[in-house]
Image: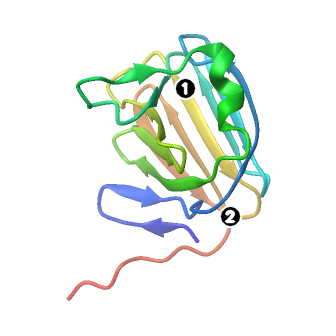
Amino acid sequence: MLKELKDRWILGLRGTSVATVSGNPEGSGLTVILDDGTDLNVSGPTLLTRGSATAPEVVPLATEELDDLVGATIASAAAFKSGSLRVVFNTGHHLNVPGWDHKADVRVQKPREFCWSREDGIGTMKVLGPVTSPKIM
């Protein structure tokens, strides 16, 4: 279930499997379709790595390795109000689209629940179903 926090949305995709992956993570875009129908589409630069993007020995995933993600499950997925997107897979792969890189348009759409998009560096959420907010104590 979608959960809104102060600076981000937790997309509620944990445990969802990757059905298909296509594109070129090295520059022209990427499309990831999950088994629940969620569509993640990046037009423009994408950083898809084996390991965290901030790790000293980070290795970008080559286009011919995209099939390695098919069958992987989402460990975490967050869309930030700043326009960044971070998706971590159980295989150790990380997909990052930084908010400061205005060259990429991004959309994550989960049928009947939400559509998050980033254009010109601004992340916006259109809620199509229920959303939860954390209780402030």
Estimate the x, y position of residue 86 in percent, counting from the top left. Answer: 43, 42
- The residue labelled by disc 2 is 113
Q: Looking at the image, which is closer to me, 37 or 62? A: 62
Residue 55 higher or lower than 79, as above or below? above
Residue 38 higher or lower than 9, as above or below? above
Q: Looking at the image, which is closer to me, 11 or 25? A: 25
Sequence order check: which comes first, mark 1 or mark 2? 1
Mark 1 lies on a secondary structure that is strand
Q: Residues within 10 Å of mark 2 (few under 14, many from 20)?
A: some
Q: Looking at the image, which is closer to me, 19 or 98? A: 19
Residue 127 vs residue 57: left or right? Answer: right
Estimate the x, y position of residue 16 in percent, counting from the top left. Answer: 67, 58
Image quadrant in which you'd find residue 102: top left
Residue 89 higher or lower than 41, as above or below? below
Mark 2 lies on a secondary structure that is loop
Q: Which residue sits furthest bottom?
A: 137
Q: Residue at x 47, y 42 (%)?
A: 92
- Residue 105, label in figure: 1
Marker count (numbered): 2
Image quadrant in which you'd find residue 40: top right
Amino acid type, label 2: Glu
